[in-house]
Amino acid sequence: MPRRQLSLLVHKQRVRSARPAPRPTRTRRRLPRAEREAQIVKEAIRFFAEHGFKGRTRDLAERLGITQPLLYRYFSNKNALIERVYEEVFVARWNPDWEVWLTDRTQPLQARLVRFYQDYTRSILTYEWIRLFLFSGLEGLDINRRYLRFMRERIWSKVVAEVRFETGRPPLEREPASETEVELVWAVIASIFYIGVRRWVFGLRVPEDLDAVIEDKVKAFLEGAPAAMAAPAKSRISKRPRPTDL
Amino acid sequence: MPRRQLSLLVHKQRVRSARPAPRPTRTRRRLPRAEREAQIVKEAIRFFAEHGFKGRTRDLAERLGITQPLLYRYFSNKNALIERVYEEVFVARWNPDWEVWLTDRTQPLQARLVRFYQDYTRSILTYEWIRLFLFSGLEGLDINRRYLRFMRERIWSKVVAEVRFETGRPPLEREPASETEVELVWAVIASIFYIGVRRWVFGLRVPEDLDAVIEDKVKAFLEGAPAAMAAPAKSRISKRPRPTDL
DNA sequence: GTTGGTAATTATCATTTGATTATTAAAGCG
DNA sequence: CGCTTTAATAATCAAATGATAATTACCAAC
């Protein structure tokens, strides 16, 4: 879009003039390899969260105060950098304790659920996580699918199992989790996720005290869900309605 | 991303070979101006909903079975086409009757709300609407802001007014709508919107019978909301936490 | 048929943009 | 201080991409 060129140049100029160097070669800051790499990754997370994965490497470099080719000394190509961002945001923020907490039957179920949901929320309800997850979803990237499947296998199934145990219903080995059951469990985190969307995608105001919101949701879930789970799951759920070309 | 070039070529080849013309000039279909324009707009809506507004004009043209320069005989530039897509999806789908229905006090409030929400849902819960709205939100485009403000002014304020009237509370002129009130009204459509996100962004299964879902939500809203609205609105809502650069 | 108007195409331009190559220079070490 | 290492830059490439100019050919009107 050559029309954009103008504003782009203006932007460049503005940023440049903020640095000391007025004209000659850019002051060359020579950092240890690991440090520079960490710096790039950190800024890339923010950058791709803002602009999506089609954001330009030149703009990213500019924000870092480095030249664009330098990125390629740390990451073989743009996609490698994106992969690293995924790794950092979606994989590294996973807390193995969550599964431990959820299944620790020395604690009451409600306390376990509240603890998990509150901590999980703190990990995903960030500008970066929400927007990167949305971007990857919109672009039909595999990371998204993988993450959702992982959550289902590691977390939601455990919650269903615990609720069943609590209410004296058959274990998952004897009766697999129904759509309805997973749905109900999903719903809690979905409403949390949506708070992030409203805040960081639509710029709307959102509740301040998230811990309280979560506690309410978990209580509501534990009041209503067991009964709904027990009901014969005449599936009101449709098949995967994904457009053919995504 | 020159790496993409390969798959692009393959794609082109595949599509080309699907058409009859093996080598010579493409069979030239000469349509009336209005008809071609409508065809372009229709496909552009789908196209941008899939790929975002950074989608390439060449790919769009290819899908239409026309050459890329032809787009520029109907729209002066890419942005004009995008504007037209907005117009078509966000403005033209607005139904003025909604405001009439909501304020028609000859009907019971619950029936009015159910009617509005069900019809509104039918209008926005589409692949195109949901994804375009998200893309425009993520890119911080103004259309998004404008739409949300418009909804608040035209719809949500009316719902609040009607609930107040129903419960014998002071009218909006005497006591402006609190954050909490708008929040509660918002929540119903938010949960509907989120169904669309799950379906068309994350490829998850969603409830089939939306009318039933909406009816439930409206009932729940009318059961709980009036009391919550009446409560002193000690705002648990934070200020606009939008990143500085969007 | 012939022909005029214009829808549509082909060829091409100017930028943009991911990526590479050849230099330059900052920092650590003896 | 001189030398080595390699982080970082400048210069540049090739493909992609929005947009334009020149040309072609479909269709309706006569």
Image (tube, coloured by chain):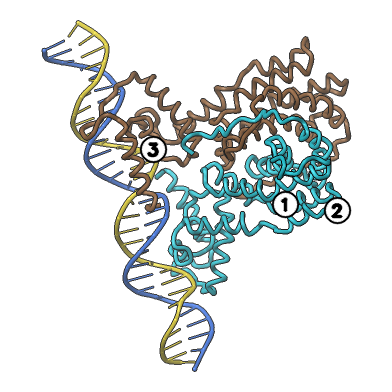
Chain colours: A brown, B cyan, C yellow, D blue
| Residue drawn 49% across the image and 50% down it | B55
Three-letter code for the amino acid on which mark 2 is drawn: Gln
Residue A176 vs residue A34, the one in the foreground: A34
Q: CA distance from mark 1 to mark 2?
A: 18 Å
Please, which chain is the residue tagged with disc 1 on?
B
Q: Are marks 1 and 2 on the same chain?
A: yes
Mark 3 and mark 2 in contact? Answer it, CB < 8 Å: no
Of B22 and B182, nearer the camera is B182
Q: Is residue B235 left or right of residue C23?
A: right
Instruction: Quickly name the residue at label 1.
Output: B120
Between marks 3 and 2 in the image, the one whose residue lies nearer the viewer? 2
Using residue A224 as the reference point, say whether residue B146 is left or right of it: left
- Residue type, numbered disc 3: Asp
User: Which residue is disc 2 drawn over?
Assistant: B107
- Foreground tag (1 vs 2): 2
- Horizontal and vertical percent position of residue A70: 33, 31
Q: Dot 2 falls on which chain?
A: B
The residue identified by callout 3 is: A59
Residue A31 horizontal/vertical position (percent):
32, 20
Where, by quadrant of the figure, is residue B196 drawn?
Answer: top right
Asked whether residue B205 appears in the rendered view, the answer is: no
Left or right of B103, for residue B151? left
Q: Residue at x 63, y 59 (%)?
A: B92
- B47 vs B203: above or below: below
Lower sequence index among marks 1 and 2? 2
Q: What secondary structure is marked by label 1?
A: helix
- Label 1 crowd bin: few (<14), some (14–19), many (20+), radius 10 Å: some
